[in-house]
Every structure is written in structure tokens, then in C-alpha cells.
Image (cartoon, rainbow, N blue to C red):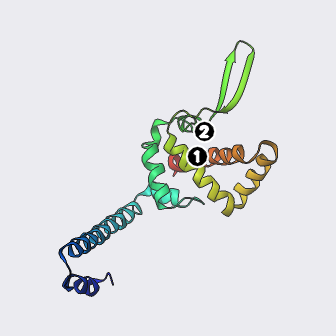
Amino acid sequence: MFGKKGRECLRSLKLGSLDRLVLDNHLQHVESLEGQIGRVDEIRRRASLDEDVRLLLSFTGVDICMALLIRSEIGDIGRFPDYKRLVSWAGLAPFLHQSGTLEVHGGVTRQGSRMLSWIMVKAARSAVRHDERMRVFYERVKRRRGDGKAVVAVACKMLKVVWFMLTRR
């Protein structure tokens, strides 16, 4: 129906002016969506040629869109001298307040790139289902701390691995 012949058939229909206007609007919308799909396919093709994206795609739980988002959020990995800085920048590092001999540990800081922490938690959920090592780690933390903290711990661990993958190739 929405192939070339189907659209030609729809355009050749004898309709009233209002119906013609509505149909033409819908056909134009379908053509616009096809153009956008073509651009997304081109983005995916070009992204698959990028070395960083290919490294991230080798990670369980990361698809092409996630890899592109992680790469764009991190930018140049060289600006993070160690994985701790990357984890902290993503807002997945635990809160620590020190005053003299007093140390107070808390939850994650949630400061930094919200988009990166969101996509890493999403990837962690997927990795827990499909990667045995991540599932074992998740289950161990979940028994002590609960589901939410366990998923964030997996996301933090995955981000550490991302840092090593991108810095050491």
C-alpha cells in the first residue's frame, strides 16, 4: 500500500478537497519518515567504521545506538587520566565526605553526565540478563544491597571496563 505503486494509486484517487488534503499530508509524512530512516541507516553505517564504536559494540548489552551515545558523551577518553575520574564524571561514584578522622559514605553522587549514567544503567540491565560474569556480580551485590544498588554497581563496573577498552584498545 505504501510502496511506489501503492502511493501512485493513492495519489490518483478522486477525492474531495478536504480528503485530498488529508491524504496528501499523510503521504508526505510517509516520505519524510523514509528519508529519516535512510539518514539513520547512513549514521549506523558510518558509526560501524569508527574504532571506538566497534570496541563498545563488543561489549555485552551495548547496541549501536548505545555505543554512539557513550562515545559522544565521553568524547576524548584521554581527558580522564584513570577510570575513577570517568566513573566520577558519570555520576556513578559513591559519595564520600571526610572531615578529620570522620568518613561518611553514601550513595552515588548523581553529578556529571546524566545521559552517560542513564545509558550505562540501561546497558547494565541488559548485560545482567546476557553476560554470566555480570549476572554473578549483580546477584552477589543484590543479596547485600538490593536491586537498584546492584544495577548501579554493574554500570560502574562496565564503565571501568569501557575506560580500559578505549584507552588500551
Report the residue marked by disc 1: 159
Residue occupying the point 73% across, 57% down: 135
Vertical placement of 120 versus 62: above or below?
above
- Left or right, 99 with reference to 61: right
Vertical placement of 119 versus 30: above or below?
above
- Looking at the image, which residue sits at the far right? 143
Q: Give the amino acid at mark 1.
A: Leu
Where does the image place residue 16, in percent across and percent down from the top left? 19, 78
Q: Are marks 2 and 1 in contact (CB under 8 Å)?
A: yes
For the residue labelled by badge 2, is the local secondary structure a helix, a strand or a loop?
Answer: loop
Q: Residues within 10 Å of mark 2 (few under 14, many from 20)?
A: many
Q: Give the amino acid at mark 2.
A: Leu
Quadrant containing the N terminus is bottom left
Where does the image place residue 157, in percent across and percent down from the top left? 65, 46
- Left or right, 129 with reference to 168: right
Where does the image place residue 67, in percent across and percent down from the top left? 48, 55
Camera-side residue: 137 or 18? 18
Report the residue marked by disc 2: 92
